[in-house]
Image: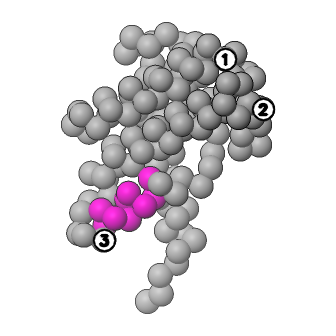
């Protein structure tokens, strides 16, 4: 039996994307819609999802369950996205495009981009600290 790396990466990416959709904060959880929407805009912009895939693969490599590693994989992607949002800000790189679409500060303003990035960082630690 041969290992299909492309299929494995696609499977992990799809699972991570689905999990990210379910853990994003909502107004029901106390997060204002405008902030949650800004967080979602950047987090769901696509990308290779290499970091969460490495987390999931590492869990599997030591006999762990991919589903149990998913919160950590999501947290890693949230922290990575936070760093990209802040890196794109005018005070840093002032990038206007990310993953083929306008950066968050271009779409929602610099202040909202800062709030969304900070929200993703805080949410990542929340996800890590709670049972799935």
Q: Farthest residue to the front: give it.
A: 91
* Residue bearing mark 3: 61
Whole-number angstrom distance, CA of label 2 to CA of label 3? 38 Å
- The quadrant of the image that shows the C terminus is top left
Query: For residue 7, which quarter of the picture?
Result: bottom right
Q: Earlier in the sequence, mark 2 or mark 3?
A: 3
Residue 96's label in the rendered image is 2
Q: How is the image coloured?
A: one colour
Position in image of residue 78 (x %, y %): 47, 37
Work out whether residue 5 or residue 72 is closer to the camera in this orientation and state it: 72
- The magenta segment is 52-60
* Residue bearing mark 1: 110
Horizontally, residue 30 falls left or right of residue 99, namely left
Whole-number angstrom distance, CA of label 2 to CA of label 1? 12 Å
| Identity of the residue drawn at 57% across and 20% down | 114
Q: Is disc 2 in contact with disc 3, using a CB cutoff of under 8 Å?
A: no
Residue 111 appears in view? yes
Whole-number angstrom distance, CA of label 3 to CA of label 1? 41 Å
């Amino acid at each position: 039996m041969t290992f299909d790396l492309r299929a494995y990466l696609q499977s992990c990416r799809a699972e991570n994307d689905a999990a990210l959709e379910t853990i994003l904060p909502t107004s029901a959880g106390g997060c204002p819609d405008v902030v949650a929407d800004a967080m979602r805009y950047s987090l769901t912009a696509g990308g290779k999802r290499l970091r969460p895939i490495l987390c999931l693969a590492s869990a599997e490599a030591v006999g762990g369950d991919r589903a149990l590693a998913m919160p950590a994989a999501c947290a890693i992607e949230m922290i990575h996205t936070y760093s990209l949002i802040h890196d794109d800000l005018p005070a840093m790189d002032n990038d206007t495009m990310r993953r083929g679409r306008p950066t968050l500060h271009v779409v929602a303003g610099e202040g909202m981009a800062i709030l969304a990035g900070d929200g993703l960082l805080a949410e990542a630690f929340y996800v890590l600290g709670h049972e799935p």
